[in-house]
Image: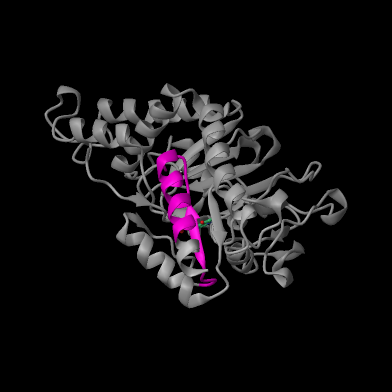
Amino acid sequence: KYDRVYNFSAGPSMLPVPVLEKARDELLNYHGTGESVMEMSHRSAEYQEIIDRAEADLRDLLKIPDNYKVLFLQGGGTLQFSMVPMNLLRKSKKADYIITGNWAKKAYEEATKFGDIRIAATSEPDHYSYIPKCGRDDFREDADYVYICYNNTIYGSHFNYIPDTGDIPLVADMSSSFLSEEVDVSKFGLIYAGAQKNVAPAGVTIVIVREDLLGFADEKTPIYLDYATHAKKGSMYNTPPCFTIYMAGLVFQYLKSIGGVKAIHEIDVKKAGKLYDYLDSTDFYRTGIEPEDRSLMNVTFVTGNPELDAKFVAEAKEQGMINLKGHRSVGGIRASIFNAMPPEGVDKLIEFMKQFEAKNR
Ligand code: PMP
């Protein structure tokens, strides 16, 4: 209908068409206010309703317990690499990190500026091909928190278990799997996710944090970087990214309308399952991740020949399937198939892969 491409980017990525249509319909005159949400005061009653509903719908979707705050912040996932240690290194100033990819490693490196940070486990020597299995014995008893990256966008791996950390708060970067699966929020001290994959356009980062962890930031902490600042003011300490939060709210409403996280997860399992089944059925393409640790959102593979990989990416683009190039740090091919990637997009990709294999074998 709109002549749209299938965008396999790891983010910013596709948004559901009904969400884009609704935003279009409301763009010039939001609910009879005579203005766009882009132009609206964040202190207006209309905007308060938008942000309140977004938070309420997200709480519903993830069954977020009452003792958790939901914050809408700026600075991307990257700022959380700093905000997490600045706020959560509250007693021993020790934290343990599990390194399963570039984003976890970057978070670890940033945290080392703020305290005694230790690597509890890493799969780096094995090219991040698996998720280490860790339990209580792997963490220092007095650690202030344990940190994981739940879904590794670049390598295409995913924590298919929640490490048991006992009483130590568990922190998870869920940027690239947020809202693609049900998670038991009560098992985490803090969850964060940048929006530009499963939630909204870039510009907002969602933080879900247990209340009792707030208020321990060093007094020299810049006011914006203290979670407590935002928690006290309902994410309205300063001007929030109003339009992006509105878009996130539309995505939440849309997800609820199709049956919530459980329903989208079933669709995601089918989409990724088809792609992995095909990959497993051929030796023309190879995927380097242990089967039990595979991501439903980012599916990575290679032909074994970098020139052929580049040809694959270029020819797919000609057929309306864009951004299939692997991350610049690893190369190869990556199909990011977030919630808003229609199943037909995955079917079309598999068809293309078969034809490409037949021609280039
Ligand atoms: N964490 C993960 C898992 C990511 O995939 C990314 C970016 N793709 C980041 C953090 C960094 O996010 P941002 O670009 O929003 O700072």
Q: Does residue 196 appear to the left or right of 304 in the view shown?
A: left
- Name the residue: 29% across, 41% down: 243
How far from the left and from the top, in percent, is residue 191? 59, 43
Q: Nearer the viewer, residue 309 or 233?
A: 309
- Range of the magenta residues? 329-355
Q: Reply above or below: 117 against 160.
A: below
Q: Does residue 295 appear to the left or right of 290 in the view shown?
A: left
Q: Reply above or below: 75 against 20.
A: below
Q: Nearer the viewer, residue 240 or 127?
A: 127
Q: Nearer the viewer, residue 317 or 339?
A: 317
How far from the left and from the top, in percent, is residue 142? 81, 53
- Name the residue: 24% across, 33% down: 21
How far from the left and from the top, in percent, is residue 160? 70, 44
Q: Reply above or below: 188 against 137.
A: above
Instruction: Quarter of the image for the N terminus: give it.
Output: top left
- Name the residue: 41% across, 65% down: 313
How far from the left and from the top, in percent, is residue 2? 22, 41
Please say whether residue 348 is one of the residues in the magenta stretch: yes
